[in-house]
Image (cartoon, rainbow, N blue to C red):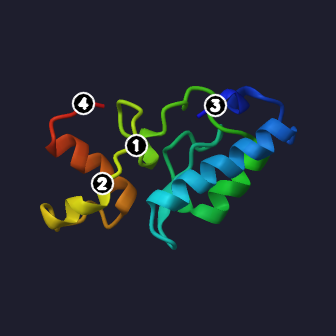
Amino acid sequence: MDRSWINSRLFSKPHLDGVDEFMKFVSERCEENEEILCPCRKCLNQVHRHKGVVEDHLYINGMSSTYNRWILHGEPPDGRINENADRMDEHFPVRFAGTSCGWLILQDFVRGKSL
């Protein structure tokens, strides 16, 4: 996935398309009404917000320039997408902090993967 948009000018086509791509990525991995960490330049993955607010922040503030591996939003630390991550519930039925995004991070921890 090309992430050069992270450093592009705000409201440029690459920036707008990149925000759309990130939000699609997050929506595929997180619950519908789930609050997620906001990776904008202002929040820096320190504040949980609803996805719509995160999207607005990314359009207005831009993405944190150092956040190019989306591990806090469901991307595995090694950069590969695990096609069977949804089957982990069969083996580990307890949710982490009530969020599927946080749950993916816990799954990697249980498997011995480092962040």
Q: Nearer the viewer, residue 92 or 81?
A: 81
Residue with the mark numbered 1:
81
Which mark lies nearer to you, 2 or 4? 2
Image location (x, y in percent) of residue 41: 65, 37
Q: Vertically, is 50 above or below 40?
A: below
Residue type at the position of mark 4: Ser
Residue type at the position of mark 3: Arg
- Circle nearer the N terminus (3, 1): 3
Which mark lies nearer to you, 1 or 4? 1
- Circle nearer the N terminus (1, 4): 1
- Circle nearer the N terminus (2, 4): 2
Residue with the mark numbered 4:
114
Label 1 neighbourhood size at 10 Å, few (<14), some (14-19), many (20+)? few
Image location (x, y in percent) of residue 76: 36, 39
Residue with the mark numbered 3:
3
Q: Residue at x 61, y 47 (%)?
A: 22
Q: Are marks 3 and 1 in contact (CB under 8 Å)?
A: no
Mark 1 vs mark 4, CA separation in Å: 16 Å
Q: Are marks 3 and 2 in contact (CB under 8 Å)?
A: no
Q: Residue at x 41, y 48 (%)?
A: 74
Residue type at the position of mark 2: Ala
Which mark lies nearer to you, 3 or 1? 1
Label 2 neighbourhood size at 10 Å, few (<14), some (14-19), many (20+)? some
Residue with the mark numbered 2:
85
Mark 4 vs mark 3, CA separation in Å: 23 Å
**16 sits left or right of 111 in the view:** right
Residue type at the position of mark 1: Ile
Mark 2 vs mark 1, CA separation in Å: 9 Å
Q: Quadrant of the C terminus?
A: top left
Mark 2 vs mark 4, CA separation in Å: 17 Å
**62 sits left or right of 107 in the view:** right
